[in-house]
Image: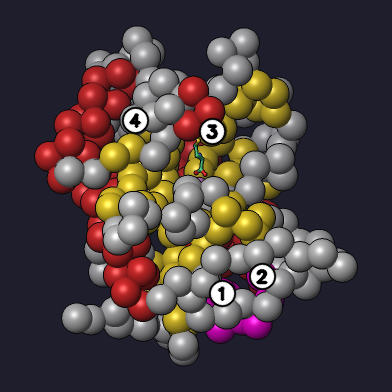
Amino acid sequence: MFRERIQLKTLDEIRLMRSAGHIVAGMLAEVRAAIAPGVTTAELDAIADAYLVSRGALSNFKGYHGYPATVCISVNEEIVHGIPGERVIGVGDVVSVDGGCSVAGTGGKRWHGDSAFTVVVDPAADDDAALSTVTEDGLWAAIAAVARGQRLGVVGDAIEQVVAEAAANGTTVAIVQEYVGHGIGTEMHQPPEVLNYSTRERGVRLKPGMVLAIEPMLTGGGAGNRTLEDRWTVVTRDGSRAAHWEHSVAILPGGVNVLTALDGGAAGLERFGLTPVPLEP
Ligand code: MF3
Ligand code: CO
């Protein structure tokens, strides 16, 4: 059976990807701090753009298949790929921001990072806050599963398990299936596809040097979705709200380092009894 080639990175290349990842983390932190009622999504995009300019990095979203902005901002019923514009953030909104950048390496190569978070603007409805928390928990459970696991299929299994536990505790969410995570390296999107749900395939063997962008998208209603006439914005069919969390994760001997987290993932992995594999110097 034909298998797509997965780019394995050297330690030095992973360190370059960490440089990109930490710039993405800084960019998203600045955007997050500016999210408040009355702000437009275009104003948030401008903050992201200025941050990347100040760090000498390039947005890998802008110009991607003609995408017109630095980041994607998806509000409420928008799941992913929302285009920043005149939409005004309001109280109680569920705001997902997805962004990335590339930095220069040797030989004309560029190394990429990609990450997303969701925030619910205060006062948050309990079910919206739970939706975002379950999605973030699913991401970290998947990262921990990759740190311990042998096969890529552990990602979808871990997310499904978190979703099942949430349902048992009264939070019902659905996993969006049409959009998936991906390998990342000298391009933002590389093989393999990283599914957010379980299948019978166990998936490729996880190897040191792989870097995966893991990005669950969950809704508080049905998982059905469609793309708006702008040809980018993906919304739920039933109008239910959605959350999206993403990190770029390097697989290393003995575990992982979360390249888009400034602490390498230490805080997120702690509850699993794991620590990130250091990349020093
Ligand atoms: N959201 C996608 C990802 O995280 C990338 C967005 S492509 C863009 O993989 F063109 F919309 F920027
Ligand atoms: Co991604």
Residue 160, magenta (yes or no): no
The answer to whether residue 197 shows anywhere in this view is yes
Q: Are marks 1 and 2 in contact (CB under 8 Å)?
A: yes
**Residue 258, percent across and down?**
38, 67
Q: Where does label 1 land, which residue?
A: 146
Decide if residue 105 is on the left or right side of residue 112: left
Residue positioned 65% across, 21% down in the render = 227
Give the residues in magenta. Answer: 144-152
Residue type highlighted by circle 1: Val
* Cα–Cα span, label 3 and label 4: 14 Å
* Tag in front: 3 or 4: 4
Nearest to N terminus: mark 1 or mark 2 = 1
Q: Residues within 10 Å of mark 4 (few under 14, many from 20)?
A: many
* Cα–Cα span, label 2 and label 4: 30 Å
Q: Where does label 4 land, which residue?
A: 70
Query: Could you say which is closer to the camera, residue 169 or residue 73?
Result: 73
Decide if residue 240 is on the left or right side of residue 63: right
Q: Are marks 3 and 4 in contact (CB under 8 Å)?
A: no
* Cα–Cα span, label 3 and label 2: 23 Å
Nearest to N terminus: mark 2 or mark 4 = 4
Residue positioned 48% across, 32% down in the render = 64
Decide if residue 113 is on the left or right side of residue 246: left
Mark identifier at residue 152: 2
* Cα–Cα span, label 1 and label 2: 7 Å
Q: Residues within 10 Å of mark 2 (few under 14, many from 20)?
A: many
Q: Where does label 3 land, which residue?
A: 80
